[in-house]
Image (tube, rainbow, N blue to C red):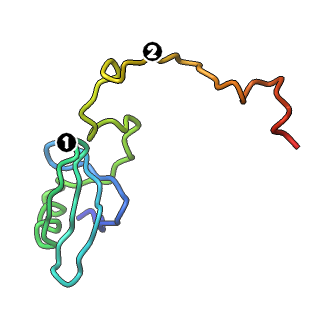
Amino acid sequence: MNVIRPIVGQWYRGGTNELFEVVAIDDHDQTIEIQYFDGTVAEMEFDSWNEQLLDELIDAAHAPEDWSGAVDMEAEDLDREFEDNARTLWSLPNDRSLRR
């Protein structure tokens, strides 16, 4: 059995390949609060976590690079044009006024 303890702030991948983060652990109620990548919040009992571990349905995962999972907005909805290498004026190499 692969022992994976729930850790607040750690990301995991579930049995149906869904990505979720542990956001709270309640030792008194023996529950784990999780938030899926799409923003849905759910609660899992310690026993359920352990059963899924036995069935190898939970695995540790890296945090998603795309933070927009829970944000229901497309880039076009922001009414802005995005550039790949946009720089702000204060960060130009010639601007030494902010350097010491």
Q: Residue at x 81, y 38 (%)?
A: 98
Q: Nearer the viewer, residue 3 or 78?
A: 78
Q: Earlier in the sequence, mark 2 or mark 1?
A: 1
Q: Residue at x 16, y 68 (%)?
A: 50
Quarter of the view holding residue 74: top left
63 vs 74, left or right, is: right
47 vs 33, left or right, is: left
Q: Nearer the viewer, residue 90 or 64?
A: 90
41, above or below 6, in the image:
above
10, above or below 15, in the image:
below
Q: Which mark is residue 17?
A: 1
Amino acid on which disc 1 is placed: Asn
Crowd tier of the residue under label 1, counting other residues whose Cα lies within 10 Å: few below 14, some 14–19, many 20 or above: few
State the image coordinates of residue 23 (x, y, percent, origin top left).
Answer: 29, 62
* Callout in the foreground (2, 1): 2
Q: Nearer the viewer, residue 66 or 18?
A: 66
Q: Residue furthest right?
A: 100
Q: Nearer the viewer, residue 72 or 41?
A: 72
11 vs 29, left or right, is: right
User: Do the numbered discs 2 and 1 sit on residues whose CB atoms are within 8 Å?
Assistant: no
State the image coordinates of residue 10 (x, y, percent, origin top left).
Answer: 36, 58
Q: Which mark is residue 81?
A: 2
Question: What is the C-alpha distance between the residues marked 2 and 1?
Answer: 33 Å
Q: Residue at x 17, y 78 (%)?
A: 30
State the image coordinates of residue 73 (x, y, percent, origin top left).
Answer: 27, 29
Q: Residue at x 75, y 24 (%)?
A: 92
Quarter of the view holding residue 86: top right
5, above or below 38, in the image:
below
Q: The N terminus is located in which quarter?
A: bottom left
State the image coordinates of residue 21 (x, y, percent, origin top left).
Answer: 29, 54
Secondary structure type for disc 2: loop
64, above or below 90, in the image:
below
